[in-house]
Image (cartoon, rainbow, N blue to C red):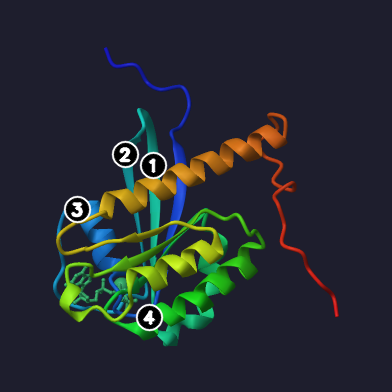
Amino acid sequence: MSKKPTTQPALHKVIMVGSGGVGKSALTLQFMYDEFVEDYEPTKADSYRKKILLDGEDVQIDILDTAGQEDYAAIRDNYFRSGEGFLCIFSITEDESFQATQEFREQILRVKNDENIPFLLVGNKSDLEDRRKVSFQEASDRAKQWGVPYVETSAKTREHVDKVFYDLMREIRARKMEENKTNNGRGKDKSKKKKLKCTIL
Ligand SMILES: Nc1nc2c(ncn2[C@@H]2O[C@H](COP(=O)(O)OP(=O)(O)OP(=O)(O)O)[C@@H](O)[C@H]2O)c(=O)[nH]1
Ligand SMILES: [Mg+2]
């Protein structure tokens, strides 16, 4: 006889952000289905859900794969609002995509109004070392300045693909536990999140 769990597994909401063509969908599909998609088909917005075992605990991950293309920039705010953690992707072969991460970071901080939001800077396409335009040093310096981890991935070889999703989920889980503690067990009160300072001019 199988026992039904009495509580629902925790759900962690992850958002993929970054310029068009950097590999947000390829990373998502590699993580979800162990497949590498060679074709480039620009995304509007796709969501995925998967049950996983995170350090011995059953959890669910919700992944929202957003559009990098500028045509969809206006609808990003709405998507970002629902995120509990962000994978901010650029391609190590394209400097412009690295420069764009600055804007994504700013938009996320503005929308979430939370400087400690779980966030990883991800340099994708690490298999294309011979076409590298962004050095490891330059990217890790930016991550350090933001106080976030920097990881290089390849959606093609699967290098560090699980790592970025699992590391982010651990950050989200830690964040939720911290929030519950400060709320003294009253888990629904989210008003005590550390807010960014707002200056009214
Ligand atoms: N060699 C290599 N190619 C990759 C990698 N990741 C993605 N690609 C290729 O890059 C192209 C764009 O990848 P997508 O995952 O569609 O890019 P995206 O970020 O989802 O783009 P938008 O949906 O427009 O925002 C595709 O042709 C992929 O096959 C990688 O790690 N290595
Ligand atoms: Mg895509």
Marking on residue 97: 4
* Amino acid, disc 1: Gln
Q: Which residue position is annotated with label 1?
A: 60
Q: CA distance from mark 4 to mark 3?
A: 26 Å
Which structural element holds mark 3? helix
Q: Are marks 4 and 3 in contact (CB under 8 Å)?
A: no
Between tags 1 and 4, which lies in front? 4
Q: Which residue position is annotated with label 3?
A: 33
Q: CA distance from mark 3 to mark 1?
A: 15 Å
Q: Earlier in the sequence, mark 3 or mark 1?
A: 3
- Residue 166 in the image: x percent, y percent? 36, 46
Q: How many marks?
A: 4
Q: Earlier in the sequence, mark 2 or mark 3?
A: 3
- Residue 133 in the image: x percent, y percent? 29, 81
- Location of residue 52 by image quarter: top left
Marking on residue 161: none
Q: Is residue 138 left or right of residue 125?
A: right
Q: Are marks 2 and 1 in contact (CB under 8 Å)?
A: yes
* Amino acid, disc 4: Ser
Which structural element holds mark 2? strand
Q: Which residue position is annotated with label 2?
A: 52
Q: CA distance from mark 1 to mark 4?
A: 30 Å
Q: CA distance from mark 2 to mark 1?
A: 6 Å
Q: Is residue 103 left or right of residue 193?
A: left
Q: Earlier in the sequence, mark 2 or mark 1?
A: 2
Ligand 1 falls in quadrant: bottom left
Position of 34 relative to 38 (above/below): above
Q: Tell which of 115 and 59 is nearer to you.
A: 115
- For label 2, the crowd category at 10 Å Cα-Cα, with few meaning under 14, some 14 to 19 and many 20 or more, is some
- Residue 184 in the image: x percent, y percent? 72, 30
Residue behind label 4 places its C-beta within 8 angstroms of ligand 1: no
Q: Are marks 3 and 1 in contact (CB under 8 Å)?
A: no
